[in-house]
């Protein structure tokens, strides 16, 4: 609809007696309206818009740069000759493992009055042996309330599975006396699962990852990055190629274990570590302990002598 | 000009009238013709019926069964109609669930309890036109005897429980006829919640169901619910008897209110008044003092609470347990939780058909539980709730929404619908609850939860007359009124604990239903006293 102009109905310069409780403000409309009109009329660009455009260009440029960097990195990682030979790197002396200090409050958040209960859901067909060993180690460090339950999705389990965390603690009637809860539930799950704080943390899946979590509670992680990486590599090798792999893969892992154990008593050198726990459990579970090469045999024997693996043997068929 | 106009209009009117009259006449003629046709048809049909009805003795209405004769006829139950019975000629007694006539055929769905089977009548060698018509006109819910041949079907009959066979009817007799108008339609009563709204179909509301409970109980869902409930009761008994418990019967008319006095029904008792028992607790404890060691009882319990919620009834069936223990009341918790787990397992293994049937109308997740049962402490529960953002005091009782929330939190972490919350604050429990030995703020008492709702509340009881008197005084209870109760502990009483479960609630929560009236056969609440 076309608009037309009307003469102002009141003169602009009327004097009004304002009450003393009010005060004057400068006109907020006049400036802005003038500006937009101006821009529209002359086809000029608002400096604010210009600045925004510049910023977007800058962000995009930086994104392209990042992408290029990541592409470069991918290339380095996937090409074999870029792979680091960890053995040639200097070794920091491995600390006596599983003696480190860990403060539960700093690791798991402040105690709010509830028992800090680690819940592990595992399928009875694949008992998580390495976690049982770690449970034993946790019990040496902390007051642990351990319990084993059977979930209704599983009709029943053999009795050794129900007693795999050892006899009931004599104080188990008073949950408040414990620092840590370790609840193992035999359940029909496709992948081993750990739940701790359902509100702040998503469930952790896979035996290897849960083992890493538990070992951190022991404060036993290697401090230097090289051993940490080696440990991670051994754990993954054990879980993916020994426990889940085919015959050929298993044989290959046993060979490389044998080589590594020829160089040092334990997988990471002079100290017993999580890598030994997980690998040994996987070798035992795969039923390869009898046919393993000499160094592996010797190493299994030393593991057994440590006493941490006592809970594992009743579960092996 | 005006005159002419008027005249013209009048003529037109006349013409219109005559046109109308013509139409009317025509219509009447048509009507008459139709009527005649109909009559002729009826007459013809009458003739038909009168004419040779070769199947006359193959159908009809039986005289009322007054036990005139004792037939040696074996009736096959609908649920036993399986493909193994194919080609056999059998007799079946069932209700007509639906009937659908289609030309020379009539399809009946026969129902017995929660099982249905399709039956077919077709005009042919065995059945006459009249017989098919007779079957088609039978009212729904009538009880009939049918002789039929079992036939395998190629395509599964999705609408029936017996999907692989159908019946080819050869004889059909009515045993008891139903009135044509039913107060509610069975298919409306089993329609899943929500589905009816979308398609504009009827669903039956709770009150209509309860007013016509006899018909509502015939639905497959109700049949399954109450069969399962009977299973709960039986499993409860079996498990406890196996554990060496003794079943006792306790009086329901009592002279004094057992728990202080509120919420009891008063009944006139000759020249004085008496009360209906709120719980058999006093008598259970007296049996313990009389060295029965482990007792349970199943019986009605009355609560005069004017609360109209989905989980309160004024009369319900209580399953009560009381037992002595050696040194720690956890022995009792273990015993009760194991009983519950045995019930859940029994239901899971023996009542799968019923659970599936109920799920069709009221879908819910299967009931999950752990063995042994998870036990948490009240303090932990409060901490979990606080972590979830609930503000509450240490000694405050759990509100119903908080109970629900805690149930969800526990389910998230432990994936169980059943757990025990132990060590309640002493302040929120009755006077006869044993205080915690290490912290006087707490007590040796516990609640059990199913799907986040409380089903059992129990505790170690004070078995020492001295302490009991102190506790009662602390709660400012009139000692005169509970003198008999306190006196029963004066002559040596073993340490004991126990608890009581509501049968209706357990059934409701196990099946994931939303109203306890669905699991009470003839529910009593503040607004309902009939049927």
Image: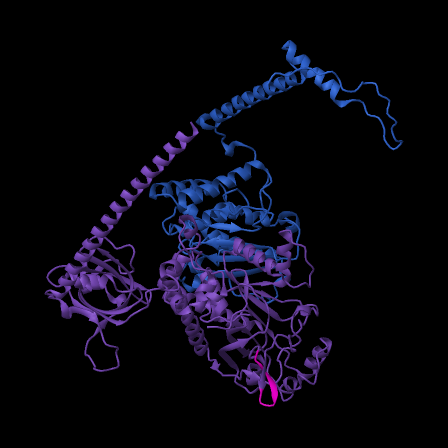
- Give x and y (percent) for residue B27: 26, 47
- The chain that appears blue in the image is A
Q: Quadrant of residue B208?
A: bottom left
- Give x and y (percent) for residue B143: 28, 69
Q: Quadrant of residue B380?
A: bottom right
* In this view, B478 is above or below B220: below
| Residue reaching furthest to the top | A42
Q: Quadrant of the C terminus of chain A?
A: bottom left
Depth order, front residue of A309/B354:
B354
The reply to whether residue B43 is visible in this rendering is yes
Count of marks overlaid on the render: 0
- What colour scheme governs how the chains and residues are painted in the rendered image of this protein? by chain
* In this view, B429 is above or below A19: below
Please provide the residue range marked out in magenta. B269-277
> Taken as a whole, is the magenta stretch helix, strand or loop?
strand
Q: Quadrant of the N terminus of chain A?
A: top right
Depth order, front residue of B20/B513:
B20
B274 in the magenta segment: yes
The reply to whether residue A298 is visible in this rendering is no
Residue at 49% across / 31% down in the picture? A85
B426 in the magenta segment: no
* In this view, A250 is above or below B218: above
- Give x and y (percent) for residue B464: 66, 82
Chain B, colour shown: purple
Depth order, front residue of A246/B456:
B456
Q: Quadrant of residue A25?
A: top right
Residue A222 horizontal side relative to residue B438, left or right: left
Residue A96 horizontal side relative to residue B218, left or right: right
- Give x and y (percent) for residue B90: 18, 69
């Amino acid at each position: 609809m076309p608009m037309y102009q009307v003469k102002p109905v009141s003169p602009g310069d009327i004097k009004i007696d304002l009450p003393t409780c009010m005060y004057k403000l400068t006109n907020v409309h006049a400036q802005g309206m003038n500006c937009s009109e101006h821009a529209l009329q002359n086809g000029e660009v608002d400096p604010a818009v210009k600045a925004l455009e510049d910023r977007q260009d800058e962000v995009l440029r930086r994104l392209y740069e990042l992408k290029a960097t990541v592409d470069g990195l991918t290339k380095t990682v996937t090409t074999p000759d870029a792979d680091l030979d960890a053995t040639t790197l200097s070794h920091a002396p491995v600390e006596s493992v599983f003696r480190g200090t860990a403060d539960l409050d700093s690791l798991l958040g402040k105690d709010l009055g509830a028992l800090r209960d680690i819940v592990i859901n595992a399928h009875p067909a694949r008992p998580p042996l390495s976690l049982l060993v770690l449970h034993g180690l946790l019990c040496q460090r902390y007051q642990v309330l351990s319990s084993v339950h059977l979930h209704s999705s599983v009709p029943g389990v053999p009795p050794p599975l129900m007693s795999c965390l050892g006899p009931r603690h004599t104080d188990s009637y008073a949950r408040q006396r414990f620092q840590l809860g370790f609840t193992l539930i035999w359940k029909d799950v496709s992948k081993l699962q750990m739940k701790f704080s359902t509100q702040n943390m998503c469930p952790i899946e896979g035996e290897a990852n849960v083992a890493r979590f538990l070992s951190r509670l022991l404060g036993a992680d290697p401090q230097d990055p090289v051993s940490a990486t080696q440990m991670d590599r051994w754990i993954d090798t054990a879980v993916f190629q020994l426990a889940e792999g085919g015959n050929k893969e298993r044989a290959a892992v046993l060979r490389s274990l044998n080589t590594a154990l020829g160089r040092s008593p334990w997988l990471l050198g002079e100290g017993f570590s999580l890598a030994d726990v997980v690998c040994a459990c996987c070798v035992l579970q795969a039923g390869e302990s009898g046919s393993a090469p000499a160094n592996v045999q010797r190493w299994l024997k030393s593991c057994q002598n440590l006493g941490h693996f006592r809970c594992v043997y009743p579960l092996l068929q | 000009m005006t005159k002419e106009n008027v005249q013209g209009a009048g003529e037109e009117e006349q013409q219109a009238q005559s046109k109308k009259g013509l139409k009317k006449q025509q219509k009447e003629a048509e009507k008459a013709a139709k009527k005649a046709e109909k009559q002729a048809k009826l007459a013809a049909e009458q003739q038909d019926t009168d004419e040779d009805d070769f199947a006359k003795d193959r159908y009809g209405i039986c005289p009322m069964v007054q036990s005139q004769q004792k037939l040696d006829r074996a009736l096959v139950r609908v649920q036993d109609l399986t493909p193994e019975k194919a080609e056999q000629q059998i007799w079946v007694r069932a209700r007509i669930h639906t009937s659908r006539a289609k030309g020379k055929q009539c399809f009946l769905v026969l129902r017995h309890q929660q099982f249905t089977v399709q039956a077919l009548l077709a005009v042919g060698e065995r059945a006459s036109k009249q017989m098919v018509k007779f079957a088609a006109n039978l009212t729904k819910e009538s009880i009939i005897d049918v002789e039929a041949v079992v036939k395998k079907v190629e395509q599964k009959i999705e609408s029936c429980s017996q999907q692989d066979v159908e019946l080819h009817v050869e004889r059909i007799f009515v045993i008891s006829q139903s009135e044509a108008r039913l107060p509610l339609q069975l298919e409306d009563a089993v329609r899943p919640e929500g589905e009816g709204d979308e398609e504009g179909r009827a669903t039956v509301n709770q009150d209509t169901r309860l007013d016509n409970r006899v018909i509502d109980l015939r639905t497959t869902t109700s049949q399954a619910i109450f069969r399962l409930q009977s299973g709960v009761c039986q499993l409860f008994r079996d498990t406890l008897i196996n554990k060496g418990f003794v079943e006792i019967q306790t009086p329901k008319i009592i002279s004094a209110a057992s728990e202080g006095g509120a919420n009891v029904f008063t009944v006139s008792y000759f020249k004085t008044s008496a009360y209906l028992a709120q719980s058999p607790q006093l008598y259970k404890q007296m049996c313990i003092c009389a060295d029965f060691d482990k007792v349970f009882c199943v019986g009605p319990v009355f609560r005069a609470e004017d609360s109209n919620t989905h989980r309160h009834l004024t009369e319900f069936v209580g399953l009560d347990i009381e037992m002595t223990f050696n040194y720690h009341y956890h022995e009792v918790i273990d015993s009760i939780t194991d009983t519950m787990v045995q019930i859940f397992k029994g239901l899971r293994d023996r009542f799968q058909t019923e659970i599936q049937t109920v799920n069709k109308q009221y879908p819910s997740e299967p009931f999950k539980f752990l063995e042994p049962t998870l036990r948490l402490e009240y303090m932990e529960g409060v901490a979990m709730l606080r972590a979830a953002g609930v503000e509450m005091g240490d000694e405050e009782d759990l509100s119903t929404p908080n109970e629900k929330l805690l149930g969800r939190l526990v389910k998230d972490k432990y994936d169980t619908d059943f757990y025990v919350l132990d060590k309640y604050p002493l302040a929120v429990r009755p006077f006869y609850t044993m205080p915690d030995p290490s912290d006087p703020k707490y007590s040796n008492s516990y609640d059990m939860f199913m799907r986040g709702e409380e089903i059992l509340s129990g505790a170690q009881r004070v078995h020492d007359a001295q302490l009991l008197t102190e506790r009662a005084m602390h709660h400012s209870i009139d000692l005169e009124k509970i003198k008999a109760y306190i006196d029963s502990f004066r002559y040596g009483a073993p340490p004991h604990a126990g608890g009581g479960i509501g049968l209706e609630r357990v059934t409701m929560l196990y099946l994931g239903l939303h109203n306890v009236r669905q699991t009470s056969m003839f529910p009593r609440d503040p607004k309902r006293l009939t049927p």
